[in-house]
Image: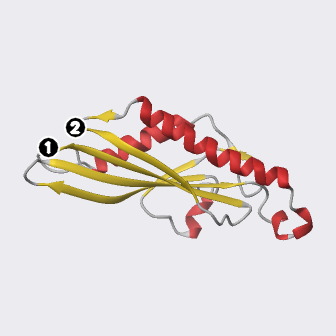
Amino acid sequence: MTLIDIEKYLKTMIKSAIEDLKLKDKDGNPSDISVLTGLLPPKNYYKTINEYPFVLLRTHKSSTDRISKVLNKKFIVYLGICAEKENVSQNQNSFDISNYEEGHKDLNNLFERIELKLLENPYFESGHIEKIDFEAFLEQPYPYFLGQISIELSGSLLIKEGFSEY
């Protein structure tokens, strides 16, 4: 299974975990969560998708043991949500602790939905999920809440003819 195959598998699992979840966008309106792969797109790309909330899946690390033919891969999933309207939070008098608490809960909910979906079916074509870690960043740039999930996978080396299509 190639990195691209695993990325597609993880993206499908993540999308199905959060398909019915709506979180606030930068205008404070309930919004679908954008699920992206790779790097963050350029700013002008956000005209076609919501900048917040988002889930960004990236390949982080890959190693292969030639002798045992075991593959180890690590993916990082970045989570980003907005607790309230972006412009309102610039005024210090508008800070509402309930929005802050809801943002914290939304970030945890997003993580747990993804975690439970991945643990529901931890096996794929030639391997399995070894470990899932979640970290909420200590410094949160309010009104945004950011976190990351590390997903470590192991599997056997399969030689395929050619590569997967993008």
User: Position of 159 compared to 14: left or right?
Assistant: left
Query: Is tag 2's residue or tag 1's residue first in the polypeptide sequence?
Result: 2
Q: Which residue is mark 1?
A: 158
User: In the displayed image of the protein, which residue is found farthest to the left?
Assistant: 67
- 2 and 1 marks in contact (CB < 8 Å): yes
Quadrant of the rendered structure where residue 76 is?
bottom left
Quadrant of the rendered structure where residue 146 is?
bottom right
Crowd around label 2: few <14 · some 14–19 · many ≥20 (10 Å): few
Q: Please report the residue visible at 62 percent of the width from the left and 45 percent of the height from the top.
A: 108
User: Position of 125 compared to 74: left or right?
Assistant: left
Residue 132: image location, x then y, percent:
43, 45
Q: Which residue is mark 2?
A: 126
Query: For the residue marked with disc 2, what is the amino acid?
Result: Ser
Residue 149: image location, x then y, percent:
48, 51
Q: Please report the residue visible at 84 percent of the width from the left and 63 percent of the height from the top.
A: 88
Q: Please report the residue visible at 41 percent of the width from the left and 59 percent of the height from the top.
A: 38
Asked whether the viewer can see residue 50, the reply is yes
Number of marks in the image?
2
Q: Where residue 127 is drawn, which disc sits there?
A: none
Q: Is residue 92 above or below residue 15?
A: below
Query: For the residue marked with disc 1, what is the amino acid?
Result: Leu
How far apart in space, not on screen, are marks 2 and 1 (Cα)?
A: 7 Å
Q: Is residue 85 above or below residue 101?
A: below
